[in-house]
Image (tube, rainbow, N blue to C red):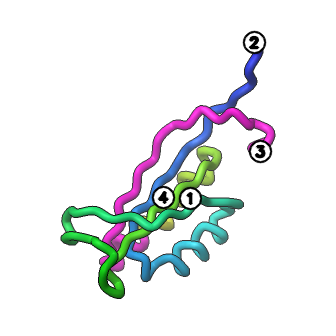
């Protein structure tokens, strides 16, 4: 079976839910055309994020983008860190089964 794939970058961003609107704006500004968003819970440097209180919940945004866009996105997200926001950002290579989306 002949399967056509391409390799892109998957960037995952974990942030406080209060940053959702701002992060969506940033994604658009750097050329991200789509994302997947989840409400998430966990425990780490900023304490337990249970989602039980206002501002006590986190989101996970996932995007798959070409390398150049991921570099621009990482630079923009670094700006949030420099302003003191708590973000956890991961970038990994992703084999994509729908290369036509990245044409």
Query: Which of the 4 image quarters holds residue 18?
Result: bottom left
Q: Give the spatial CA distance, label 4 vs label 1.
A: 6 Å
Disc marking residue 74: 4
Q: Are marks 3 and 2 in contact (CB under 8 Å)?
A: no
Query: Bounds of the magenta span?
Result: 79-103
Please state if 23 lies on the left or on the right of 32 as rendered. left
Q: Quadrant of the N terminus?
A: top right
Q: Quadrant of the C terminus?
A: top right
Read off the residue under disc 2: 1
Read off the residue under disc 1: 72
Q: Are marks 4 and 1 in contact (CB under 8 Å)?
A: yes
- In the image, is residue 102 above or below residue 58? above
Element type where label 1 sits in the image: helix
Q: Nearer the viewer, mark 3 or mark 1?
A: 3
Q: Are marks 3 and 1 in contact (CB under 8 Å)?
A: no
Ranked by sequence position, the earlier of labels 3 and 1 is 1
Please state if 71 lies on the left or on the right of 4 as rendered. left
Q: Horizontal and vertical percent for residue 89?
A: 40, 57
Ranked by sequence position, the earlier of labels 2 and 1 is 2
Classify 10 Å Cα crowding around label 2: few (below 14), some (14-19), many (20 and above). few
Read off the residue under disc 3: 101
Residue at point 50% right, 51% down?
11
Residue at point 35% right, 70% down?
81
Q: Give the spatial CA distance, label 2 vs label 4.
A: 36 Å
Q: Nearer the viewer, mark 3 or mark 2?
A: 2
Ranked by sequence position, the earlier of labels 2 and 4 is 2
């Amino acid at each position: 079976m002949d399967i056509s794939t391409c390799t892109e970058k998957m960037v995952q961003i974990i942030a406080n839910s209060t940053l959702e609107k701002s992060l969506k704006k940033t994604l658009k500004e750097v050329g991200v055309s789509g994302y997947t968003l989840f409400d998430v819970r966990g425990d780490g440097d900023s304490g337990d994020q249970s989602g039980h209180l206002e501002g006590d919940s986190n989101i996970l945004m996932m995007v798959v983008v070409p390398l150049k866009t991921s570099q621009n996105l990482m630079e923009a997200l670094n700006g949030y860190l420099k302003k003191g926001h708590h973000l956890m950002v991961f970038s990994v290579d992703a084999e994509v089964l729908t290369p036509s989306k990245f044409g």
